[in-house]
Amino acid sequence: MSVKYILTVQCNDRAGVIADIATLISGMAGNILDFSQHSALDVGVFLARIRFEVPDAVTVADFATIFQQIAEKYNMDWRIYPENQKLRAAILVSKTRHTLYELLLKHQDGQLNCDFPVIISNHSDLAGVATQFHIPFYQVDPAKGKQACEADINQILKEYSIDLVILARYMQILSKEFTDRWSYRVINIHHGFLPAFMGAKPYHQAWYKGVKLIGATAHFANENLDQGPIIAQDVIHVQDTMSIAEFILKGQDVERKVLFEAVKLYLEHRVFVVGGRTFILD
Amino acid sequence: MSVKYILTVQCNDRAGVIADIATLISGMAGNILDFSQHSALDVGVFLARIRFEVPDAVTVADFATIFQQIAEKYNMDWRIYPENQKLRAAILVSKTRHTLYELLLKHQDGQLNCDFPVIISNHSDLAGVATQFHIPFYQVDPAKGKQACEADINQILKEYSIDLVILARYMQILSKEFTDRWSYRVINIHHGFLPAFMGAKPYHQAWYKGVKLIGATAHFANENLDQGPIIAQDVIHVQDTMSIAEFILKGQDVERKVLFEAVKLYLEHRVFVVGGRTFILD
Amino acid sequence: MSVKYILTVQCNDRAGVIADIATLISGMAGNILDFSQHSALDVGVFLARIRFEVPDAVTVADFATIFQQIAEKYNMDWRIYPENQKLRAAILVSKTRHTLYELLLKHQDGQLNCDFPVIISNHSDLAGVATQFHIPFYQVDPAKGKQACEADINQILKEYSIDLVILARYMQILSKEFTDRWSYRVINIHHGFLPAFMGAKPYHQAWYKGVKLIGATAHFANENLDQGPIIAQDVIHVQDTMSIAEFILKGQDVERKVLFEAVKLYLEHRVFVVGGRTFILD
Amino acid sequence: MSVKYILTVQCNDRAGVIADIATLISGMAGNILDFSQHSALDVGVFLARIRFEVPDAVTVADFATIFQQIAEKYNMDWRIYPENQKLRAAILVSKTRHTLYELLLKHQDGQLNCDFPVIISNHSDLAGVATQFHIPFYQVDPAKGKQACEADINQILKEYSIDLVILARYMQILSKEFTDRWSYRVINIHHGFLPAFMGAKPYHQAWYKGVKLIGATAHFANENLDQGPIIAQDVIHVQDTMSIAEFILKGQDVERKVLFEAVKLYLEHRVFVVGGRTFILD
């Protein structure tokens, strides 16, 4: 019997890393299934994602003990994940449902390797959707103030042992305290092609600017609104005969697509952050 | 024998405009060939582009006399262009040739309804390309100072009776005097997806931001660098395994495509400017 | 008080049509809101879609009486639709739900100007989805034979006064009798880029052929499988590292997008059929 | 001093291949620069492209001697290419120039790692373009019969020691003898989205079918017209208001893009053929 792991590695670019990793896995009677690697020469960084299988006697702790030597040699930042271990993700929503539905339907179809144990909102509108999918729904109240509201959220996240927070059009600005605590574990969808059109009403901004494409961007939330590292983004062409209202409707298709992609990439451990930007290893 | 015209109309959105124009053209024994119209309800403006043919006895002056009544009734901003009349466009370049070649090759293939009587540059690098296409090439010297250099350019543009100035990666910032004089008659290609990444080295900016698409934007140049109304723009997907140098190379394909499109739309009188943005009527 | 109509016109291309129509509508104290027209010179056909408003005293019958003269002069094929009149569409499904959800969710959001009074399937799998949206669900049994099964369907369609049949991955081949009876009123989604990959298992065909893009096509169903006039289609890029199973999952996004687009275009009366192909007037 | 090689490997999918290759290269004091690999589980095939550097004392022959053992163990089909060794490619053209210009301009910009020592045509139209780029131009005469004409071509290809033949809109059907002799070394651009619209006048076929996207496909030429393995393909959206002539013009942009991509992929040794289709390793 074997077990599958995903190993992610980040270090300064130096000769020999690939062979050393391959040899080590081979030495555990392991087999590399997928090997993705990139040397980002512009910043001198080596990144790799290795999916491999080893006899199931090899635990994460065993691997860590053996891998420690290489990790120190190259001064690596590394992680290992059992492939069958599902992360637990909370979805935060507000009133619009298109990104929520996208996550829940594709999750049901087996396209997202995680659990969705809880949905949290500042409005009650989407409680019915949560119920359709048999997921507990919690309504928090921003009127209590951001601090109290975020305390409630943190309490719920703790209760449900959440690993990842997905802002599926949550529409509230999170405090620095919150984004720091959940650093690189909050994915937000912004309804604009960042870094253009940050902040409020991006479709209105885009329409008045007369852009010929509109887009959406999924990114890690940090203390600077809509400026965290971009995970996924896409655009669609628009005609100048379209109204602002039509921008908003058409944009929803991009939003849901991009948020789903970002969450999927994250769950597959393909997202690396270097120097304030991401590198995605396919 | 008949002659073909293109009529462009811009006015406040009011009932009856379409029928009044159609009736008037019909009354000249004219025939409407193409009728494009858009009521931009978000700003209350009516726009139309009408391509029609009339007996060749009907001159532009005749049309103007007859059309004056409707134009006043609706307080129209309008223009009429004989379809067979080619605008005269000057191309300003610097050292890179991909957008220049695109314009010249597609022009030779009959895809651009204009003449290119002159090419102007601040470097000599592309003189050979101009000669291949039998177009006079002039080199101006920015070292003389922007004012003197632009005076030279204006002199050349005047000599060649130029109607439109195309900045095909010209890489110099034009003075307010120049862009005012040539208001809505200077088309620039910016190698970024505006309004993101204005100014210098947009591909470097894009790479360090970690965007997942890069783009180019053709726009009217005005006194605010890279902020004039957008005429055409497009993007391509990039992988995070691409270097800055690869961004630059890949981006060239978008730049040449978008500049060609913008010039073509302009020459076909499809570009309307309202409230600082364009509306393109297909 | 006024009422809005959509007029569609198809005739041989001849001078004067546009002006005659505009004058006639103007003569009814009408106002043209949108005017789309195309002269398909390759086949000598004129097509137009005119959205206009007239005083609400003007009924469809009134319009027809007045319009008859022009219609005869140009030997037109024409139709008029009150904009506020919703068509009644039946959705036929099988086991997969992604296109069904797309139609139902976007319909709830007000993006489709129709009613969905009934859902019909040859399996029970999607009964729960229908119920979520409070739409009656009927299960027919292909095991009874195609003829009996189609008789059942026709009976249900009649009962619910259906105008349009949408095959949202219905997966059964319809008889010539059925498609003849519902000529140009059955929209099917095929999970391949037609005319490539007709028939069964198009994603398998595509994978073994090694295509670099996969697509989907919405078309009118007729007696020839997957060969009716195409209404909408789109593609996405695929990597050669994707499996057949991944093609199938990724393709679902295109299928739902394209079917929704086709239904929307149909409901807005933008689909013209000439010589076995469609022309869409935007 | 070091030298860079590209190694390509194809074999049945078995555990241990990656580690064995990595260990072997490491054992030569080599360093893996890029490692791309894919296990195509649908057909049970392992593919890899490894770019590495070794001390320049290591010749191709040295590598082969050492690698032989692994190659036999896994029953590999493998090749090794010194990265600095340029293939010699002949371009065959007819009358249209857009794909020829694309190859020559991008080659001059350093985007294609090959030499273009000769251009061959059945017409004289493009002799001037060849001369602009200082490349010998030969005109063969199909009127002599396909056999004699191909004999002439083969003679020229031999004289110039050609490795790769690029059909840049050559427009002649090659004999089975020719494609057999140059098996997997002839790249053709077809102006249609294969496998749809094989053969003559694909844009006419597409227009009459009413497709909503048109495309182009670069593929290896074999004895079956337009049916060889696809290397690259792309599409663009078209409006139904476009004429056949506009399809042809717009399609040229896709043709040149796709042919360039295919040649680039080939020269970078990223194209694998398995069971009649290609797999591209990025």
Image: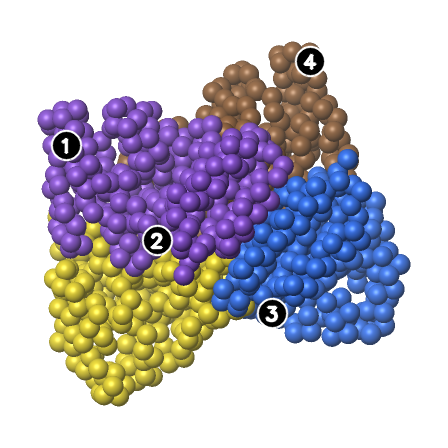
Chain colours: A yellow, B blue, C purple, D brown
Camera-nearest label, 1 or 2: 2
Number of other residues with Cα within 10 Å of mark 1, as a class: few under 14, some 14 to 19, many 20 or more: some
Q: Are marks 3 and 2 in contact (CB under 8 Å)?
A: no
Residue at position x 57%, y 47% from top? C23
Camera-nearest label, 3 or 2: 2
Q: CA distance from mark 3 to mark 4?
A: 60 Å
Say which element carries label 1: helix
Badge 1 amino acid: Asp
Q: Which residue is mark 3?
A: B276
Quick check: A199 above or below D248? Answer: below
Number of other residues with Cα within 10 Å of mark 3, as a class: few under 14, some 14 to 19, many 20 or more: few
Say which element carries label 4: helix
- Residue B253 at x, y percent in the picture: 59, 51
D8 sits to left or right of C171:
right
Picture mark count: 4
- Residue D156 at x, y percent in the picture: 68, 23
Residue at position x 14%, y 60% from top? A132
Camera-nearest label, 1 or 3: 1
Quick check: A60 above or below C177? Answer: below
Number of other residues with Cα within 10 Å of mark 2, as a class: few under 14, some 14 to 19, many 20 or more: few
Pointers 2 and 4 within a single chain: no
B62, D255: nearer the viewer: B62
In the picture, the disc for residue D143 is 4
Q: Is residue A41 visible?
A: yes
Which quadrant holds residue D20? Answer: top left
Q: Which residue is mark 2?
A: C84
Chain to which mark 3 belongs? B
Say which element carries label 3: loop
Badge 3 amino acid: Gly
- Residue B219 at x, y percent in the picture: 63, 62
Camera-nearest label, 4 or 1: 1
Which is more N-terminal, label 2 or label 1?
2
